[in-house]
Image (spheres, rainbow, N blue to C red):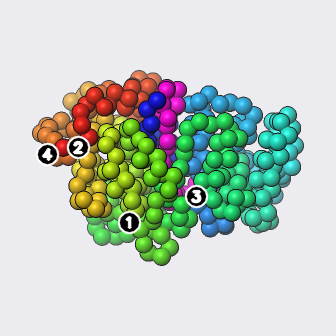
């Protein structure tokens, strides 16, 4: 059973996660700990705890891949209505927290009791002024579990996995709850936090991101989650991506000890290129992206070096620029192809035939499992 570690964002690797979860592998997802948007933003601001949105989303993807579709998973994957007012949303939350939902009523008492305890713990912590609209029940349960276990998100994730019978692992790359991601544009202007960078204006996207910083509340580099270092040490394959490059992938390198831990492991290191450009990579090629990735790696590595990166690059079959929606394809240029640049392009037709702009999870998963045949990790 191969042990695969994927550093990713929230949704971009969904198809790949699902495909790997249905193979004979031990999969670990490492997700960002600096998310500042979405429904989890209110929880983070109210309770000053680690953002749980990407964690919950990755756990639900893992559950889907493992074909877990029981009542617990269905409850964890529900969301409060967004169309009603705050009072109606609170009443809808109470419908769950008081155990009146049919899925909760028919659960085994032990499961039901654990879930209700976490929901009620969450309700007590956020108080009467919290806005539940469009909130994820899974986020509320995971946050309640974290509070109930003295702020230990790793224990909360373990409990969440057991409740859903999930086999795969999901860990935030850091346990620090006050991380802020900021970026400097090429005109020297700064943008922060993460959700601002993800939704750059057309003007800012055209200027482009020059550099990013990931700092904790004390102004220092965040430390790695011990569970992440343990997963790296046992890995047979380590992959970065796909996902938003500057906000979901590159910041993982800025978490202290992650890069050095990967360098100590004698296993292939992959970079899974996105199919399309996004607001963070307007006008860039995949070669530009991976060159930035390697440069950042070298700048934070104790050795000053980087492993030879195998880049899974989608082969674009047309000789002219083509877009899906407003974003063009992220093109890779195979020439000049030399290991001296620090990476090797492994081209394939990785785009899903039925969902343009998305990865074919099965094809990418197969390539990931075959990657050791490409040669040694080091040059």
The residue that disc 4 covers is 340
* Real-space CA distance between mark 3 and mark 1, rounded to the nearest whole angstrom: 18 Å
Front residue of 346 and 222: 222
Mark sitting on residue 213: 1
Q: Residue 51 — which label?
A: 3
* Image: magenta residue range: 15-38
Q: Is residue 343 on the magenta stretch? A: no
Which residue is denoted by mark 2 in the rendering? 378
Relative to residue 365, is residue 243 depicted above or below?
A: below
| Cα–Cα gap, marks 1 and 2 | 28 Å
Residue 246 makes an appearance in the image: no
What is the secondary structure assignment of the residue under circle 2? loop
Query: Which residue is depicted at the point 46% across and 29% down?
Result: 1
**Nearer mark to the viewer, of 4 and 2:** 2
Q: Estimate the x, y position of residue 347 in percent, counting from the top left.
A: 26, 30
Write the residue at 61% across / 56% down.
153
Q: Say whether marks 4 and 2 touch (CB < 8 Å).
A: no
Residue 172 x %, y %: 52, 53
Q: Secondary structure at mark 4?
A: helix
Q: Nearer the viewer, mark 1 or mark 2?
A: 2
In this view, the mark in front (3 or 2):
2
Q: Is residue 136 left or right of residue 276?
A: right
């Amino acid at each position: 059973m191969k042990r695969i570690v994927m550093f990713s964002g929230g949704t971009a690797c969904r198809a790949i996660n699902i495909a790997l979860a249905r193979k004979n592998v031990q999969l670990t997802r490492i997700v960002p700990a600096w998310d500042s948007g979405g429904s989890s933003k209110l929880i983070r601001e109210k309770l000053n705890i680690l953002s749980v949105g990407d964690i919950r989303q990755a756990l639900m993807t893992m559950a889907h891949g493992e074909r877990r579709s029981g009542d617990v998973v269905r409850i964890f994957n529900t969301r409060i209505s967004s169309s009603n007012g705050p009072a109606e949303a609170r009443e809808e939350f109470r419908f769950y927290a008081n155990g009146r939902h049919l899925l909760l009523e028919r659960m085994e008492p032990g499961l039901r009791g654990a879930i209700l305890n976490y929901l009620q713990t969450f309700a007590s912590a956020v108080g009467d002024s919290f806005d539940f609209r469009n909130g994820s029940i899974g986020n509320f349960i995971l946050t309640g579990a974290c509070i109930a276990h003295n702020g230990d998100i790793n224990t909360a994730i373990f409990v969440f996995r057991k409740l859903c019978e999930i086999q795969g692992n999901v860990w935030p790359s850091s346990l620090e709850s006050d991380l802020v991601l900021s970026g400097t544009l090429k005109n020297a202007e700064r943008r922060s936090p993460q959700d601002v960078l993800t939704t750059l204006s057309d003007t800012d996207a055209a200027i482009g991101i020059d550099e990013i910083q990931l700092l904790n509340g004390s102004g220092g580099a965040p430390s790695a989650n011990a569970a992440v270092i343990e997963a790296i040490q046992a890995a047979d394959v380590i992959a970065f991506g796909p996902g938003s490059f500057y906000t979901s992938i590159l910041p993982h390198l800025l978490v202290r000890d992650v890069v050095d831990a990967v360098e100590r492991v004698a296993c292939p290191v992959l970079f899974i290129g996105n199919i399309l450009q996004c607001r963070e990579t307007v006008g860039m090629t995949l070669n530009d992206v991976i060159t930035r990735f390697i440069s950042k790696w070298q700048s934070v590595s104790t050795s000053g070096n980087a492993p030879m990166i195998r880049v899974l690059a989608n082969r674009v079959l047309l000789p002219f620029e083509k877009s899906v929606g407003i974003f063009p394809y992220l093109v890779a240029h195979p020439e000049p192809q030399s290991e001296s640049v620090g990476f090797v392009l492994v081209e394939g037709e990785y785009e899903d035939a039925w969902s343009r702009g998305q990865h074919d999870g099965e094809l990418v998963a197969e390539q990931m499992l075959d990657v050791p045949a490409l040669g040694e990790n080091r040059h």
